[in-house]
Amino acid sequence: MINRIVRGIAGTFILVSLLLAIYVNIHWLWFTAFVGANLLQSSLTRWCLMDKILIKLGVKDEMKPGQSC
């Protein structure tokens, strides 16, 4: 459950920042790069700040050990 929420948030951030880059200022692409870098970092280290934030907000991870997405 948490993985789906993290992916949804990341995808939303990327799409919104792309729209802001097109219609407001090209420098919003730095935010897109930041989100991408965080996704890459979390895939390599298996640590994600958004996971920790969601857990503190009370979101439960319903996946069982050994179960994939």
Image: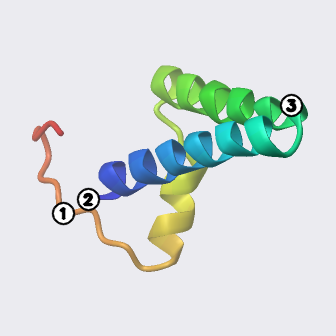
Q: Amino acid at mark 3?
A: Ile
Left or right: 28 with respect to 3? right
Query: How far apart, in angstroms, are the residues tagged by discs 1 and 2?
Result: 6 Å
First in sequence, mark 1 or 2: give its number: 2
- Residue under the image location 16 percent in, 54 percent down: 63
Residue toward you, 6 or 45: 6
Q: Amino acid at mark 2?
A: Met
Left or right: 16 with respect to 54? right
Give residue 24's mark.
Answer: none
Q: Which quarter of the rendered picture does the C terminus lie within?
A: top left
**Residue beneath label 1, please?**
62
Callout 3 secondary element: helix
- In this view, the residue farthest toward the bottom is 58
Left or right: 6 with respect to 26? left
Query: How far apart, in angstroms, are the residues tagged by discs 3 and 1?
Result: 39 Å
Mark 3 surroundings within 10 Å by alpha-carbon count, few (fewer than 14), some (14 through 19), many (20 or more) = few
Callout 1 secondary element: loop
First in sequence, mark 3 or 1: give its number: 3
- Residue under the image location 42 percent in, 79 percent down: 58
- Residue under the image location 37 percent in, 73 percent down: 59
Give residue 1's mark.
Answer: 2
Question: x, y (%) of residue 15?
Answer: 57, 42
- In this view, the residue farthest toward the front is 23
Q: Nearer the viewer, mark 3 or mark 1?
A: 3
